[in-house]
Image (cartoon, rainbow, N blue to C red):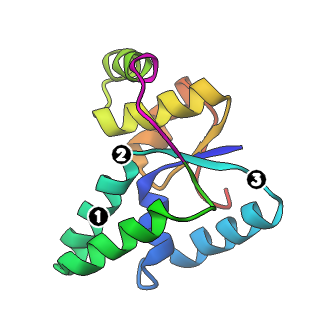
Amino acid sequence: MATVDSSVIVALFNSRDRDHAACLAWFREAIGNGEPLRAPVTVLAEVAAAIMRGTGDRQLARDVAAQLRHSAMFELLPVSLPLAERAMAIAADHNLPGHSALDLAAADTFGDRLITLDAEQLRKGPDVVETARPGG
């Protein structure tokens, strides 16, 4: 099982991203193996923001986030108070931004590994959960 960071999802949707091929290969394998994929629901805003920053296309940002929202491939996790409290502790203990701590808290809560392209999550995440790059 895997919790997926927004960096991986953005690379999946952007064929010009340098990590697109690796993310796509990992995604196809995970889906083919029936591996459950999860992300905190906040991933919708993170993906929309990244698409908007990268393209300047407001409608594309909304469309990609909507496609993710309605995808049967990802379980979007609500941010409950216990999950937020776990993220708070991770953020404080490991000096991580909130979105990174939330991804790690979700993975920790569900016993998942975190799949990410984020260098800081890859460096600090193993103190909390198994953390890997797509295909890595």
Gap in angstroms between the C-alphas marked 3 and 2: 21 Å
> Mark 1 or mark 2: which comes first in sequence?
2
What residue range appears in magenta? 76-83
Q: Position of residue 43 (x, y in %)?
A: 39, 51
Left or right of 88, for residue 126: right
Identity of the residue furthest to the front in this view: 70
Q: Position of residue 47 (x, y in %)?
A: 34, 61
Pointer 3 residue: 35
Pointer 2 residue: 42
Query: Does residue 78 appear in the picture of this structure?
Result: yes
> Mark 1 or mark 3: which comes first in sequence?
3
> Mark 3 or mark 2: which comes first in sequence?
3
Identity of the residue furthest to the right in this view: 33
Amino acid at dot 2: Thr
Give the residue at x 45% y 71%: 67
Pointer 1 residue: 48
